[in-house]
Amino acid sequence: MWLPTEIANDSFTKEYVDFNKRYQTGELSNSDWKEWRETKFIATIEKTKNSLFYQKHINYGDIKSLADIEKIPFTTKDHLRENMGDILSGSLNDALYFYETTGTTGRATPCPRDYKEAIASNSQVTAAWREIFDSVFGKDYRPIVGLMGPTEVHSFGDTLGSVCQNMNVCNMKIWPYSPVIGFPKALELMNTYGVEVIACTPGVAMNLMKSAKHYGYDLKKDFKVKAIFLTGEMSTPGLMKNITSIWGAQVFNCLYGSQEAFVIASSRSDGDMYIAKPNYIFEVIDPETNKSLGSTGKGELCLTMLINGIKPLVRYRTGDFVEIYKTERPEPYDLKINIIGRTKDRIQLNGNMFSAFDIESSILDQVTHCYGYQIIIDQKNGEDYLDIKLEFAENTPNIETMLAAVKASCARQLRINANVEVIGELDQVVSTAAFVSWKAARIVDRRTKEIDSETQVAQKMAANRGYR
């Protein structure tokens, strides 16, 4: 890993690099983990004493060790929005980067990072990406990487650019929605210079497919893309299979994280996602009872950071519905995570509650060569039903068979009747998922007359999300 001399020789860096090396090779003992978690947890608690918010939020006299963690109240997104800079446990003068949340679903909150947070987060992604690169391209091959994410006060470009630097591979920052780049220039650069990996959201990947068609490119003949790394929103197996069917590339749900919580988990060469154990204490919270289920199970993800940087969060409820379970494999493959969707994106259909993962899987598990989908929920004869609209690539075979399969899947998995039809072009609101929410982008719920704030934001944003 490339680091300035003063940081490379820092005591934290030396300690973290050594611990992570032993983690990646499965050499850590139970006593190693117990000491790491205990000392880092206490160091985080001590650091939060510098936070004006946590000074009032935590009763420090009750917290003697990690065993006392459940005595600490949850930290929520509302806390971040209400307290802004008072959440911070350090000065911006000590930060390397300043980021903000997007602000599309509420007030944008500050997310500065110091060198410790950057090293810890990027180290986990670097190890995972190196493994995937070796599996796709062969040992020590250096592919050209196209990074297709925001480059303003957003961590996407810096984080993944640093990861590429760690691996000594060329990266282009070609955000298609940038007024400097745009979709035509992004496609031109990919075609001219043979970009072999693209990192982007699922929405960008599918709009890129549509844009390539619009500008006369053949995805398989005119490009050299062999791997697509998805991030920024939920990526179900059906969605990844669908993108593969059009690009002909291997698709990975490459990382899961957020501006405020950094990179929480990364995909490995087997396509599964494993959590960054050295960096967090993980809890799964039952969203109905608000009780902790421990470190495994299905529920809302809650994090306590073990890296005491500028903004360490304690018992932070991410708002994401996940499943964490232990595998039979050694570290770093022993704790796997599936991202099921935001807790707010769960939808009730005919009295049954379904996650975004359930709903998307019932559709995309059945199709290939699909540019996207949108679901209209309405009622007929007192029962909910779905009107599902799908957009396909030209000359897609067996469309009628796939439409019938989607209808049958909805009846079987969601226990609901559905009309499934092909549409010439979907509303651009579908492309806003990573910036607002899956629900605002994909769902039109006619059972209610009120349009929620997220949907309003998505509709406004859609006007500027074209692929041309």
Image: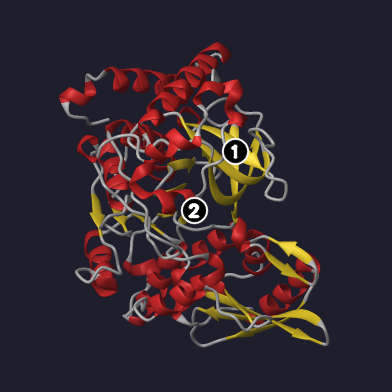
Residue position marked by numbered label 2 in the rendering: 78
Q: Secondary structure at mark 2?
A: helix
Residue position marked by numbered label 1 in the rendering: 336
Q: Is residue 144 above or below residue 188?
A: above
Q: Is residue 275 above or below residue 388?
A: above
Image location (x, y in percent) of residue 288: 72, 50
Q: CA distance from mark 1 to mark 2?
A: 28 Å
Mark 1 Cα shell of 10 Å, populated few (<14), some (14-19), many (≥20): many
Image location (x, y in percent) of residue 97: 25, 44
Quadrant assignment for the N terminus: top left
Q: Residue furthest top?
A: 31
Give the number of the disc on residue 273.
Answer: none
Measuring 67% from the left and 60% from the top, which residue is drawn there? Answer: 355
Is residue 88 something one can see in this rendering?
A: yes
* Quadrant of the image occupied by residue 181: bottom left
Mark 2 Cα shell of 10 Å, populated few (<14), some (14-19), many (≥20): few
Which of 440 and 124 lies nearest the eye of the viewer? 440
Q: Which of the two labelled residues, at mark 1 and mark 2, occupies the earlier sequence position?
A: 2
Measuring 57% from the left and 51% from the top, which residue is drawn there? Answer: 320
Type of the residue with mark 2: Asp
Q: Residue furthest left?
A: 5
Image location (x, y in percent) of residue 263: 43, 42
Measuring 29% from the left and 72% from the top, which residue is drawn there? Answer: 183
Q: Is residue 362 above or below residue 134?
A: below
